[in-house]
Amino acid sequence: MAAEHRTRKALRVGFSTGTAAVAAARAALRWWLTGRRPAAVAVRLPAGYYLSVAVAGGGQGEGETWAGVVKDGGDDPDVTHHAEIRARLRCLPCGGEALGRASGAFGETLAGLAHGRRPAGDPLICLVGGRGVGRVTKPGLPVAVGEPAVNPGPREMMTVNLRDELRRPGGSEPPDLHSRKPWSPPQAPHILLGGLGESGAAPAWVLEVEIEVIQGEVLARHTLNPRLGVVGGISILGTTGLVRPFSHEAYEETIQAELSVARSNGCRTVVLSTGGKSEHLAQRQFPDWPPEAFVQIADFFAFSLREARRAGFGSVVHSVFFGKAVKMAQGHEYTHAHRNRMDLGSLAALCREGSHPDALCREIEEANTARHALEILLREEAMDLVRAVAEEAAEASWRMAEQAMRVRLLLFNHDGRLLADVSRP
């Protein structure tokens, strides 16, 4: 065992889509300022230290400079692993005409800045959601409706890193600025990140950074973005800037986001399913419920209950198969097989309490899996035991939610048949 531990390969940490987008933008800005394409850039992460990121490609032309970065998920890859994320940079003078054409909150912010809250020599940043970057269409996310799906963490990283780049030696005076056509707000979804200086004068120029994700529309089909109301591409994410292998943080954040969207869209009850199949079966039971009401929680049993209660839901519905129900009935807060191995002793004890034959109880106790045990129970038509597991699982959920929410549990067979439908209280 010791030798095995010594030779075990260390898991490689990757970086987020947010870090990739920031690295691409920083590379494009350096190229524009210096006239030289960098092979790599150092991205300042939220923790304050720097990560070197390779630049995959780029180009110049038609008043813009662009650079690309290939996202690296490390040893915890997802659908965006190896996706190319590009930043197209345009640097333009900011005149009064552009300020006048800006509308809504964006225009109000520009007007305020024009009255003396940013240094004249420093730019505003206009972050644009290009092809392959999603647009938010539903409330409940940390990004407002209508904006590009770039989360607050990457937005802040973008501002910090572009400021750092401008402060590099020789990087404070943008070339050829006065020969360019004045900036005006783009038609694509965009946000104003603000100026980069601190002295208090109106902005003189704009850094317009358009983020693109190659094949982002295709990648988004394999994410939860459509359900969250993010259309047209993926989200640019990242709290720490890094992707740590097998971390639960990303999934927990997704659960929180889905619950927030459901609540913001008027759902009073959410269906917590363990995966796509159990969710589909629940959707057949509630065909008129909106898609926002269905949340996949994987093995995060207790976490999802706490977050649902915190979000203000009065009731939840669990949609599960037998194996998860057995673990829920045993009170496991996290139901993954690697964390909590299946123990069928409690099921065998229920069998004995129900005065079933000893031979059946032994067969249940010696079953290979929960699915095998269910096959035995169905063969013997011991539906009282199947329902007892569902009732205990619902009871455990109700207690875990501190009896503050009504809990309903739908227990399905793998063939799609509803085996039990129980509620607490």
Image: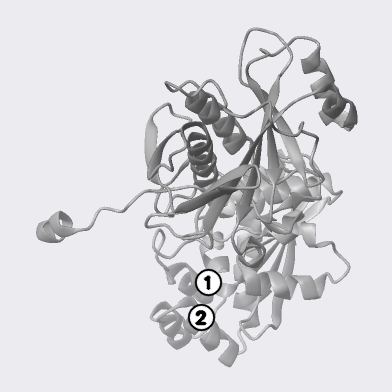
Nearest the camera: 361 or 60?
A: 60
Quarter of the picture holding the C terminus: bottom right
Residue drawn at x 48%, y 50% as measured from the top left: 248
Work out how far the residue at label 1 is from the one at label 2, CA to CA, in angstroms: 6 Å
Q: Please tell me which of labels 1 and 2 falls first in the chain.
A: 1
Indicate which disc residue 371 carries.
2
Task: Give percent across and percent down for residue 66.
Answer: 56, 47
Amino acid of disc 1:
Gly
Amino acid of disc 2:
Arg
Displayed quadrant of residue 38: top left
Residue 314 visible within the image: no
Residue drawn at x 38%, y 45% as measured from the top left: 39
Residue drawn at x 61%, y 67% as measured from the top left: 275
Q: Label 2: how many residues lie within 10 Å, few (<14), some (14-19) or many (20+)?
A: some
Task: Give percent across and percent down for residue 23.
Answer: 48, 41
- Look at the picture and state if 268 lies above or below 197: below
Report the residue marked by disc 1. 323
Apparent side of residue 26 relative to residue 192 in the rendered image (left or right): left
Q: Residue furthest left?
A: 3
Indicate which disc residue 424 carries.
none
Task: Give percent across and percent down for residue 52.
Answer: 37, 40
User: Considering the numbered disc 1 on the image, is that residue within a helix, a strand or a loop?
Assistant: helix
Task: Give percent across and percent down for residue 291.
Answer: 79, 62
Nearest the camera: 11 or 118?
A: 118
